Amino acid sequence: MNEYILFDPNLRDRFLEFIADRGLSGEVRPDPIAGFVVALPDDLADDIEEAVEDEYAALMEEQQGLVESADDDGVKTLMSVSVTPPDGQPRDVRLPARYARRLFAHFSVEEIHEIVSAIAQSAMNPVEGPMCRKPSGSGPPSAA
């Protein structure tokens, strides 16, 4: 399956209209972090796949414009990531749009979740002392 993530419901609907006009139907589901995922079969004809990719790129450009024009003072949250700290109570970590854009530019949804979860775990269970240290009870490596 080819998957396309769209954050704005209007852009999602336009993408669905676009693919429907080409005789395709997409499977739509909410993304666990934000927005919607539209899944299409991966066996599309090359010309159809190219047209879909071009339309998606145009919609992503429009999405970026919407995000950049939004008030970026932390009031408008683009992304929320669920984490479960050691107390077992799930919580949402909200990231301002300016950081979410940068994360999505470089990482997959799964990688972003892993990064945010690692930060939350570290904040809840801080490790004292220097970052670089030998594990306790270890001596120099032995030559075998």
Image (cartoon, rainbow, N blue to C red):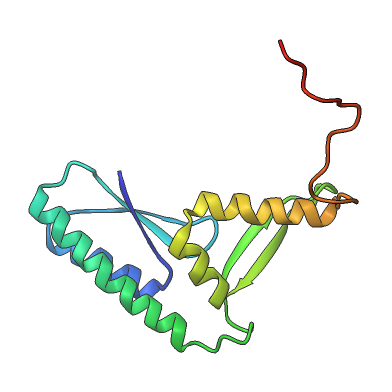
Image x and y of residue 6, in percent: 39, 66
Residue sitting at x 54%, y 89%:
71
Q: Position of residue 118 (x, y in %)?
A: 70, 50
Above or below: residue 77 compared with residue 18: below
As displayed, is residue 46 above or below residue 62?
above
Q: Is residue 30 above or below residue 99?
A: above
**Residue 135 quadrant:** top right
Say which residue appears at 49% left-offset and 71% top-offset.
101
Q: Nearer the viewer, residue 7 or 23?
A: 7
Q: Is residue 61 left or right of residue 87?
A: left
**Farthest top residue in view:** 144
Instruction: Give the image location of residue 22, x and y in percent.
Output: 12, 59
Image quadrant where one finds the C terminus: top right
Image point (42%, 61%), residue name: 36
Q: Looking at the image, which residue sits at the far front? A: 143
Name the one closer to the observer, 29 or 81.
Answer: 81
Quarter holding the N terminus is: top left
How many circles with numbers are drawn on the protein? 0
Q: Position of residue 94 (x, y in %)?
A: 65, 69
- On screen, residue 67 versus residue 23, left or right, reads right
The residue depicted at 90 percent of the width and 32 percent of the height is: 136
Q: Is residue 1 left or right of residue 120?
A: left
Residue 126 drawn above or below residue 100: above
